[in-house]
Amino acid sequence: MHHGEAPRAHEDVTGLGGPAHGDGLDEHFASLPTDIVVHETRMLGPAASTEQPAPPATERLMPPTPPAEPGDALLRGVPAHVGQRPPSYPPHPLQCPSVRDGDEFAAFTPAVLLDGAQVGRLTVRAASVRGDSHNWEGSCRQDAMVVTRVGPPEAEFLLLAIADGVGSAKYSHTGSHLVVRQAALHLDQEAESIHAALTTQDEGELRGLANKAIARAVTELSAGQDYATTLHVLLVPTDARIRERVVFSVGDGGLFVLREGRWEQGNPVDDGSLLDTRTEALPHAYRSVKAKLLRTEPGEVLLLGTDGITNPLTQKDPEFAQRLANAWGGPEVPSLSDFLWQAQTRAKSYDDDRTVICVWEKPE
């Protein structure tokens, strides 16, 4: 029996050899009254009696357990794909780095990271998945993410952060891991000031606070290492009366909002004065941290993602975006395992690491 298939008639599911039921037992079970539930089957030896004691009266009243339908498989199987053909790479981890490669951090980085939280009326699902191309090459996942809370109770935020290591930098995976954590720590120190600027909707002050915190976070990275990573941080007040959220960004990827079944970009817009077309990245190849205030309402879904998911989300073929809108725009928040499976929806030519964090807010 292949893994994931339902057993066929008379197939051995006991592991003991032979058919699942002997010919005599088949007729025996077929002749039982339909209002009797058989709870246990014993292996009968040559001298054992074949007479079965009558079940208690209470069991006679229980309805029979319906047989499992073949379509009720518990296994999700291979993630779905958009387009007529699936991507060329296999949809599962293959090789992985070795400790002997000399990069312990890469060797100990899991292919998949899954997280979630519920804070008041806010629910979070988060997944970071090694891309198909990295699976094929045996290199580690270069994306990183953080789901946490920062600030005191009176100025508390749900902080969500993602980073995408730039592949040309040797230790970009380490840089992305460190920068999301250091950014969270330093933004925590500025939480009261950020909360005050958010309530007054002072975008200029928010930008200044973000640049101060991220600049301090960057100094924590070892100067001698070849780091390069993008960074996006979403701060959502845990006080439901405050409707504004703020996103801080450096580099590709960013924020989308699912409104009325459609994805809308929520990224900060550059002022246009930057002529260099290269991707901005921390710790050194960036000019400033962009900031944006965003007002959302309960029922809308916030998506923070690296370009492994935001690029196919904005492709001309809308099938990918529509699949995720259908999966995440319904009345129920998906379970962790369902969210991971949905986040792995594949699209040909999009094989980079994929990190996505979604936030749902329950209406009052």
Image (cartoon, grey):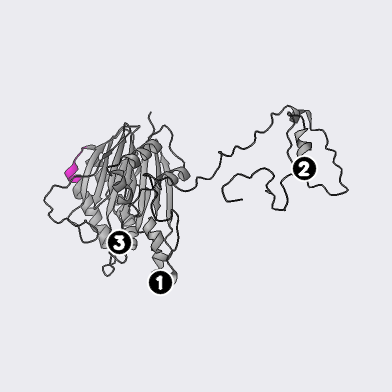
State the residue position of label 2.
Answer: 23
Q: Pick out the residue farthest to the front.
A: 84
Residue 87 falls left or right of residue 213: right
What is the secondary structure assignment of the residue under circle 3?
Answer: loop
Q: In terms of sequence position, does the residue under pointer 3 or pointer 2 come before the other?
A: 2
What is the secondary structure assignment of the residue under circle 1?
Answer: helix
The residue drawn where x is 42% and y is 66% is 97
Is 201 in the magenta? yes
Between 55 and 192, the residue placed more toward the observer is 55
Give the residue type that dot 2 points to.
Asp
Q: In terms of sequence position, does the residue under pointer 1 or pointer 3 come before the other?
A: 1
Where is residue 223? Give x, y as percent. Answer: 26, 68
Residue 26 falls left or right of residue 249: right
Q: Pick out the residue farthest to the right.
A: 47
Q: Looking at the image, can residue 192 be seen?
A: yes
**Which mark identifies residue 101?**
1
Between 116 and 31, the residue placed more toward the observer is 31
Give the residue type that dot 3 points to.
Gly
- Measured Cα–Cα span from mark 3 to mark 2: 62 Å
Q: In terms of sequence position, does the residue under pointer 1 or pointer 2 come before the other?
A: 2
Q: Do the residues labelled 1 and 2 touch (CB within 8 Å)?
A: no
Q: Which one is in front in this view, the residue at disc 3 or the one at disc 2?
A: 2
Is 144 in the magenta? no
Where is residue 355? Give x, y as percent. Answer: 36, 50
Answer few, some or many: residues within 10 Å of disc 3's Cα (few below 14, many 20 plus, some between 14 and 19).
some
State the residue position of label 3.
Answer: 167
